[in-house]
Image (cartoon, grey):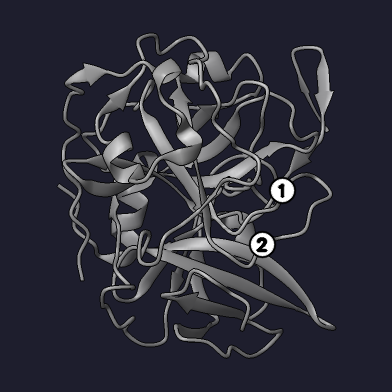
Amino acid sequence: MISTRGKCVILVFTGLVLSSNICCVLASTASEIIDDDDVNLNHIENVQDYLINGTFSDEDEFPDMGSVRIVGGEYAQLNQFPFMAIVHQLMGKGVISKCGGSIISSRWVLTAGHCMGSKPRLVVFGVNDKTGIGYNFYRGPGIAMWNEQGVLHPGYSKTVNDIALLYMPQNIPFGENIQPIRLAGFNHGTFAGWRSAVIGWGVDGPTGSGTDSLKYAVLSIISNYACSTYWSITEKHICTAIQNQEACRGDSGGPLVVYIDGMPLQIGIVSYGDGACPSGRPGVFTRVSAFADWIAHNTGLYFY
């Protein structure tokens, strides 16, 4: 339990519902502000087009998300998010710890620190539907690899430095449905006021079951100052705001993404949120740009 300004809440460390070389580019300035009251976020035919350079007018207030449906999210189209990875840790006796991750190079997958553990992991690429994944096998159209090597941040402590790198035993075969994602680097800003997408195979509520189909939800990013009203955070965190709805537990380790010039850019990693879902409290993510040095040091990937 963590006290947040007189309120005692239960943290869920299993994440949010939704809760080659890397090219890290400078963020461009948004050209216009879109009024969300005129947009139904539940029926966006092209989420990339909607997210590109979309901002809100006041970064220190909770933006009006209108009719956005956070809990449950929307189903992803085939190949819409080719950087997604399924990370299942085999805990023993048929128990699976389910996480998500993102492909950042031909050998490396980025995920949350609390997804690391000490057990072997089955990592699957190139699928939207994970029906064919069992305890220690995979029968499906994607690519599956066993993973036992990785790097956990040395300062990891659940709510701080919640980041890890998984090293694949062989090259990940890139194609139309399997591609790496760029990471936010040293020169990116806070992204407060931007629209973002969180992606994963999350659940529909605190007692819901997981979904076999990949989903996404459109969220607005708020400033750390606004987020600190609810959580004790640092500059290494990034938060998303939800009004009257909440991103629930599900695939930790999945990416928080914005789009710049039509290209996805990962700015966060699903970390934690409030167990009372929906609660209206912000979701908390690991801020990727705060760990650019650490990622570069461990992977040799180039940031600019």
**Is 304 located above or below residue 142 in the figure?**
above
Q: Quadrant of residue 180?
A: bottom left
Q: Earlier in the sequence, mark 2 or mark 1?
A: 1
Q: Residue at x 37, y 70 (%)?
A: 108
Position in image of residue 49 (x %, y %): 27, 40
Callout 1: helix, strand or loop? loop
Callout 2: helix, strand or loop? loop
Relative placement, left or right, of 83 versus 112 is left
Viewer-proximal residue, 304 or 201?
201
Within-10-Å neighbours for mark 2: few <14, some 14–19, many 20+: some
Marking on residue 221:
none
**Is 50 located above or below residue 114 in the figure?**
above
**Is 71 located above or below residue 99 in the figure?**
above
**Is 32 located above or below residue 304 in the figure?**
above
Q: Residue at x 66, y 33 (%)?
A: 246
Q: Which residue is mark 1?
A: 204
Q: Is residue 237 visible?
A: no
Q: Residue at x 84, y 23 (%)?
A: 8
Quadrant of the image for the N terminus? top right
Viewer-proximal residue, 28 or 290?
28
Q: Amino acid at mark 2?
A: Thr
Relative placement, left or right, of 294 versus 147 is left
In space, the residues marked 2 and 1 are separated at their CA atoms by 8 Å
Position in image of residue 283 (x %, y %): 60, 33
Q: Which residue is mark 2?
A: 211
Q: Quadrant of residue 143?
A: bottom left
Within-10-Å neighbours for mark 1: few <14, some 14–19, many 20+: many
Viewer-proximal residue, 46 or 275?
46
Q: Amino acid at mark 1?
A: Asp
